[in-house]
Image (spheres, rainbow, N blue to C red):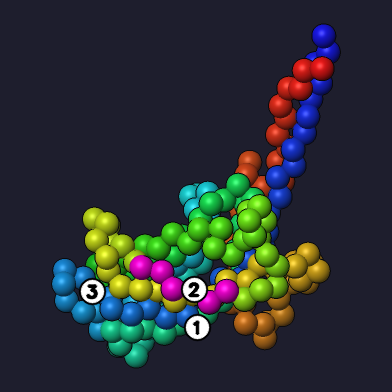
Amino acid sequence: MMFSLGVTLTTCHDVEVGVLSAEQLTINGRPIKNRAFATVRDECCPNLKSCSTEIDKEGRQCPRWKEKFLVNLASSSRNILVEVHRRGSSRDKIVGRAWIPVSDFSDEYSVPVTNRLHLLSYRLRDTKGVRNGIVNVSIRVLSPTEKSVSPSPSSSVTSQASCSGSRCGTVTGFPVWQ
């Protein structure tokens, strides 16, 4: 009986996430009129700092950010987490969260489809799980050639987050009996 080691290599995918706007935002049943911002991160990397939009300064119930972020998404990730917050005088309050399934921009084999722009809208849920508005996003998985080119200062990508630790570029072994 022989024991051998099969190896699986997990990789990361660079994903451009655009946080476009939100609508129907409330806190305690009252419409939000100003100081809203959004954060984006890979759900599998909770210790990774999230990317954040600027605060919507125009004071609307439907804030518009139109900001893009480069997120290094681990292949083991199932969701991208988008949170909408309201900046308060003493602390920020979470208005709502949306989990964007990777399957929404992947093929039937869970392989992210490169260079296709996906315009998506998701229901936000507050910390109690109650519906609380909608967030509109764009998602595009970058091709390997685009990954090697770093964004220029004039690029529309305003921030970059990258996955680190054991989830990216790790080798996983499992026994194979022959």
Residue that appears at 78% across and 64% down: 144
Residue that label 3 marks? 26
Q: Is residue 173 left or right of residue 54?
A: right
Name of the residue lying farthest toward the top = 1
> Looking at the figure, which quarter contains the N terminus?
top right
Residue that appears at 67% across and 47% down: 168
Residue that label 2 marks? 120
Residue type beneath disc 2: Leu
- Mark 3 in CB contact with mark 1 (< 8 angstroms): no
Q: Is residue 16 left or right of residue 99?
A: right
Residue type beneath disc 1: Lys
Percent of width and height locating residue 87: 31, 73
Is 26 or 113 nearer to us in this picture?
A: 113
Query: In this orientation, does residue 69 appear?
Result: no
Q: How far apart are the two marked residues, 2 and 3, measured between alpha carbons?
A: 21 Å
Name of the residue lying farthest toward the left = 29
Residue interval drawn in magenta? 118-123
Residue type beneath disc 3: Thr
